[in-house]
């Protein structure tokens, strides 16, 4: 179902990256060139307590991730900023670049204790400010306001979408889903499924 697909998308966080004709991206790029764009801009949000989530550079020093990743359930509170970091372009056990968080923001409307309501998922985002601009070395994706008409035009131009992120199966490098189905906006909420 669309709700389950969306939950999986947000759990892995990252991004539906539009692949247009002639982009030159291939399946081997994530394993062979983790330091090069776009794969270097995909990384892990890390915590001093252990564990990680996926994140993506959207400016040279700003990472987009899921808000639920920044919530520490054992402590029943948000992670302190000093406990958060980011590893860009990870390949194997060695990240290409690392930085520490100096600040982060989440939606005030997100309820970390309510993971069952679809509407809550629309607020499940976090932006982490890094102590150095890793994106100047590995690239970054940027941010755009994608309205319904713009999304329809993107779907017409794109040859496909890929979802990239770190999961519990592939711990060493970004896992890629080359058959990611991005159907459109979910009901009345500004959420792509």
Image (spheres, helix red, strand yellow):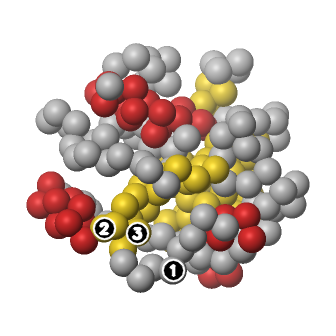
Indicate the position of residue 124 as horizontal and vertical percent values.
43, 37
Mark 3: few, some, or many residues within 10 Å (few <14, many ≥20)?
A: some
- Element under label 1? loop
Residue found 39% across the figure and 26% down from its top = 4
Residue 162 badge: none
Q: Is residue 116 above or below residue 163?
A: above
Which residue is disc 3 drawn over?
A: 19
Indicate the position of residue 7 as horizontal and vertical percent values.
43, 30
Indicate the position of residue 106 as horizontal and vertical percent values.
47, 42
Q: Nearer the viewer, residue 24 or 70?
A: 24
Residue 24 badge: 1
Q: Nearer the viewer, residue 185 or 1?
A: 1
Whether tag 2 and tag 3 are in contact, CB under 8 A, the answer is yes
Judge whether residue 143 can be spotted in this image.
no
Residue found 79% across the figure and 69% down from its top = 96
Quarter of the image that includes the C terminus: top left
C-alpha gap between disc 1 and disc 3: 9 Å
C-alpha gap between disc 2 and disc 1: 13 Å
* Label whose residue precedes the other's in the sequence (2 or 3): 3
Q: Is residue 169 above or below residue 81?
A: above
* Label whose residue precedes the other's in the sequence (2 or 1): 1
* Label whose residue precedes the other's in the sequence (1 or 3): 3
Mark 2: few, some, or many residues within 10 Å (few <14, many ≥20)?
A: few
Indicate the position of residue 85 as horizontal and vertical percent values.
73, 52
- Element under label 3? strand
Judge whether residue 16 can be spotted in this image.
yes
Q: Nearer the viewer, residue 126 or 35?
A: 35
Which residue is disc 2 drawn over?
A: 158
Whether tag 2 and tag 1 are in contact, CB under 8 A, the answer is no
């Amino acid at each position: 179902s669309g709700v389950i697909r969306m939950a999986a998308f947000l759990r892995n966080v990252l991004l539906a990256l539009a692949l247009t004709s002639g982009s030159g991206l291939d399946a081997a790029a994530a394993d062979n060139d983790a330091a090069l764009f776009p794969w270097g801009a995909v990384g892990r949000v890390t915590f001093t307590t252990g564990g990680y989530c996926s994140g993506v550079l959207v400016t040279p020093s700003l990472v987009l991730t899921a808000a639920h990743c920044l919530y520490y359930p054992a402590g029943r509170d948000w992670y302190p900023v000093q406990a958060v970091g980011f590893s860009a372009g990870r390949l194997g056990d060695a990240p290409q670049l690392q930085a520490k968080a100096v600040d982060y923001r989440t939606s005030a409307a997100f309820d970390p204790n309510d993971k069952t309501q679809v509407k809550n998922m629309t607020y499940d985002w976090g932006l982490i400010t890094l102590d150095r601009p890793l994106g100047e070395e590995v690239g970054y994706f940027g941010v755009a306001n994608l309205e319904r008409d713009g999304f329809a035009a993107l779907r017409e131009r794109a040859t496909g979408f890929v979802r990239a992120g770190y999961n519990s199966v592939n711990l060493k490098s970004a896992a890629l889903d080359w058959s990611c189905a991005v159907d459109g906006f979910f009901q009345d909420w500004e959420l792509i499924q």
